[in-house]
Amino acid sequence: MSIKENIREINEIKNEAAAKAGRNGDDILLVAVTKTRPYEDLNEAIDAGITDIGENKVQEIMDKYDFVKPVRWHLIGHLQTNKVKYIIDKVSMIHSVDSIKLAEEINKRAAQHNLTMDILIQVNAAQEESKFGITTDETENMIHYILKNCPNINIRGLMCIAPFEDNPEDVRIFFAQVKEQYDRFSKIQHERLDFKYLSMGMSHDFEVAIAEGSNLIRVGTAIFGARNYNKTV
């Protein structure tokens, strides 16, 4: 199937999953994850209706940025503090904020560009050593620190990467835990805290994530096929 056909199918599945959960599929943002994909594939996806692109690596954003049609860019992978400066004026949102040190650097660089950066706080609900993200217990402290000390950051919600399981039902519990946190912190009243996005679910588990409340799914393989690690631009 073509990229366009894959996107159509994913949107149909997304809408069906949303309907089962009593929600509107149009309220769930599909971010196309383009790790290792050439810029031609990104443009094909944009032509097929994709409005938001997610990249895992700063270098890939830098390599592709000038060749890709207008689109909202998301940094969804682990972000080193020394690389924030390269993408601060290119991305619309950073999903993977997992430390106060990183938040401080984002705030510093955003201030230099006279902008306010939207971020998501990455929660490692399963506490996997192989994945980044803070624990659910640490989330509150980070939110309050950022609101107090980082005026050039807007907190727009939470991001979760669940463990990979052959049966997506096995990770439902982790999605539910993060949704509980999302609902809790949504109640905080602050001008720079607006919980709009709960970023959960990828190609193999986004239906379960939607059932548990996700309103932003990050889909790569199901759109573009298996990754090609020999070509990035």
Image (cartoon, rainbow, N blue to C red):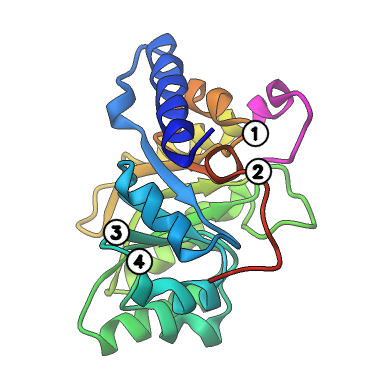
Where are the magenta residues, as a range? 162-174
The reply to whether dot 3 and dot 4 touch (C-beta < 8 Å) is yes
Where residue 174 is drawn, which disc sits there? Answer: 1
Q: Is residue 149 at all visible to an observer of this figure? A: no
In front: label 2 or label 4: 4
Q: Quadrant of residue 144?
A: bottom left
Q: Are marks 2 and 4 in contact (CB under 8 Å)?
A: no
Q: Secondary structure at mark 1?
A: helix
Q: Quick check: 85 left or right of 57?
A: left
Q: Circle 3 sits on which residue? A: 71
How much space separates mark 3 and mark 2, taking CA atoms? 30 Å
**Residue highlighted by disc 2:** 125
Marks 4 and 1, the one that precedes in the sequence: 4
Name the residue located 25 percent from the left edge and 86 percent from the top edge: 113
Tag 4: residue type?
A: Val
Q: Picture coordinates of residue 170 (x, y %)?
A: 74, 25
Q: Residue at x 51, y 59 (%)?
A: 76
- For mark 3, does the 10 Å Cα neighbourhood hold few (<14), some (14 to 19), or many (20 or more) residues? some
Disc 4 versus disc 1: nearer the observer:
4
45 w.r.t. 143: above or below: above
Chain-order first, disc 2 or disc 4: 4
Sequence-first tag of 3 and 2: 3
Look at label 2 and name its amino acid.
Ala
* Marks 3, 2: nearer the viewer: 3
Q: Which label belongs to residue 68?
A: 4
| Residue 146 spot, x, y in % from top left | 39, 67
Other residues around mark 1 within 10 Å, as few (<14) / some (14–19) / many (≥20): many
Rendered residue at 43%/56% (across/down): 42
Q: Do callouts 3 and 2 mark residues in contact (Cβ within 8 Å)?
A: no
User: Would you say the residues marked 2 and 1 are in contact, meaning their CB atoms lie under 8 Å apart?
Assistant: yes
